[in-house]
Image (tube, rainbow, N blue to C red):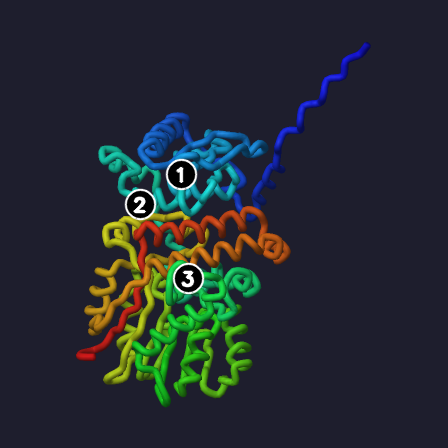
């Protein structure tokens, strides 16, 4: 008699991630050169740093995912390829950390939670005696990323001209690509349109935009603020460097019946003339670059008519971190926002004063940006197939997911903030 043993259950597997296109993502598709000593040093520093953080670390094959969730509630970082992970960090620091995620060499059970731990403990990741070696893992920002008149157009094109259809996958119907202001937190997806209108209306109120106001908007986006300002009776001139944004903004303004009140120009803020009763600029300064902040604030001042008001919305970071970041080529500056830098509140005050403006009001909404980013990220992840069909490959989708999660974590950790500011020449 032949005894037949039952077959073992098939292993629970998932397909290996597709390799990154070496033509599109050369530094993701291949591992960087790094000496054995440098890689070993990086491994030691990283493992010691991770050991001090409230995280769990798992090492496993990407083909057999296992269980991510930690029973004690700590978020879990899952290393599929620890050797590649440490080699990339040894060669390129935090740029390597991001490229390792794009390559699928690590994952997390809760990506935002893992990144929030890093953001909360950013000053503790490297022991103080080793911080002198920071230069070995960081690079200077490329000169070609400077926001000269030509460079600014190129940098804006690399981000904002990716595809209007891409941005429509995760933004709400207003196509507002900046922090909303919610009535209450946590927020639901259906709250986002009203929250974006609330944000816009608060800025227009700060600038006292109403019937007959001559308004200059620096940074058009997709036209929602211009539409709402025109609906108040303002005459709006709005400028952008994004051809894709301008094309769609013109269409949306026409559909709203406001073409006679709004002019959309493909123009640098440094090339704008005239004077205006109000100037509004929403999360534009982050793309200007520190070298050009004097030109930006000078333009705000020069375009302002006597008694006029400037309303800004700006992301901020602590001053010491801003100074360190300004000298460093980061994963964000390499892949997401070339040439940009998030200012500190101190930098905003200094640059405003140097231009002859004063900060007359300043309100923060950091928790609201974290919620905005959460809603964007959830919507983006739910549209993976749609994004794929637009022609964006797996490495891009990993990059964009990390960008949204990384940004959300910065606000969750209060490492980042977002503020609405009123600038005036004198008394309000």
Q: Earlier in the sequence, mark 2 or mark 3?
A: 2
Seen at 43% across and 83% down, the residue is: 230
10 Å crowding of disc 1: few (<14), some (14-19), many (20+): few
Marking on residue 73: 1
Seen at 26% across and 58% down, the residue is: 344
Residue under circle 3?
A: 151
The quarter of the image holding the C terminus is: bottom left
**Residue 391 place in picture, x, y as percent:** 61, 55
Seen at 37% across and 61% down, the residue is: 368
Report the mark closest to the observer, 2 or 3.
Answer: 2
Q: Residue furthest top?
A: 1
**Disc 2/disc 3 C-alpha distance (Å):** 33 Å
**Disc 1/disc 2 C-alpha distance (Å):** 17 Å
Q: Residue furthest bottom?
A: 212
Would residue 288 be found to the left or right of residue 1 on screen? left
User: In front: 391, or 58?
Assistant: 58
Residue under circle 2?
A: 120
Marking on residue 5: none
Would residue 303 be found to the left or right of residue 235 on screen? left
**Disc 1/disc 3 C-alpha distance (Å):** 46 Å
């Amino acid at each position: 008699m032949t005894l037949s043993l039952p077959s073992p259950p098939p292993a629970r597997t998932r397909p290996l991630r597709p390799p990154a296109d070496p033509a599109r993502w050369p530094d993701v598709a291949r591992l960087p050169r790094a000496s054995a000593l440098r890689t070993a040093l990086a491994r030691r520093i990283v493992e010691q740093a991770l050991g001090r953080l409230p995280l769990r670390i798992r090492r496993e094959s990407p083909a057999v995912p296992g269980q991510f969730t930690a029973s004690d509630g700590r978020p879990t970082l899952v290393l599929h390829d620890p050797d590649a992970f440490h080699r990339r960090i040894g060669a390129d620091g935090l740029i390597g950390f991001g490229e390792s995620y794009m390559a699928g060499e690590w994952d997390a059970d809760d990506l935002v939670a893992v990144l929030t731990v890093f953001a909360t403990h950013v000053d503790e990741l490297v022991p103080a005696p080793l911080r002198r070696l920071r230069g070995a893992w960081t690079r200077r920002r490329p000169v070609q990323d400077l926001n000269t008149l030509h460079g600014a157009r190129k940098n804006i094109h690399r981000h904002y001209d990716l595809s209007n259809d891409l941005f429509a996958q995760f933004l709400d119907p207003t196509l507002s690509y900046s922090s909303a202001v919610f009535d209450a937190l946590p927020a639901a997806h259906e709250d986002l349109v009203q929250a974006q209108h609330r944000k816009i209306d608060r800025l227009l109120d700060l600038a006292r935009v109403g019937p007959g106001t001559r308004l200059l908007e620096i940074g058009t986006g997709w036209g929602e603020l211009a539409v709402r300002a025109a609906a108040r009776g303002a005459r709006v001139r709005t400028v952008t460097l994004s051809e894709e944004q301008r094309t769609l903004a013109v269409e949306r303004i026409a559909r709203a019946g406001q073409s006679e009140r709004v002019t959309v120009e493909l123009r640098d803020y440094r090339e704008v003339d005239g004077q205006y009763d109000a100037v509004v600029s929403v999360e534009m300064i982050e793309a200007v670059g520190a070298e050009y902040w004097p030109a930006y604030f000078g333009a705000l001042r020069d375009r302002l008519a006597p008694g006029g008001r400037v309303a800004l919305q700006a992301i901020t970071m602590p001053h010491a971190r801003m100074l360190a970041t300004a000298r460093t080529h980061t994963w964000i500056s390499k892949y997401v926002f070339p040439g940009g830098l998030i200012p500190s509140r101190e930098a905003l005050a200094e640059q405003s004063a140097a231009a002859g403006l004063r900060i007359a009001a300043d309100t923060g909404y950091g928790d609201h940006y974290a919620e905005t980013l959460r809603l964007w990220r959830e919507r983006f992840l739910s549209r993976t197939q749609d994004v794929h069909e637009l022609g964006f490959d797996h490495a891009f989708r990993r990059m964009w997911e990390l960008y949204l999660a990384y940004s959300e974590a910065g606000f969750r950790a209060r490492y980042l903030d977002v503020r609405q500011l009123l600038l005036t020449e004198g008394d309000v």
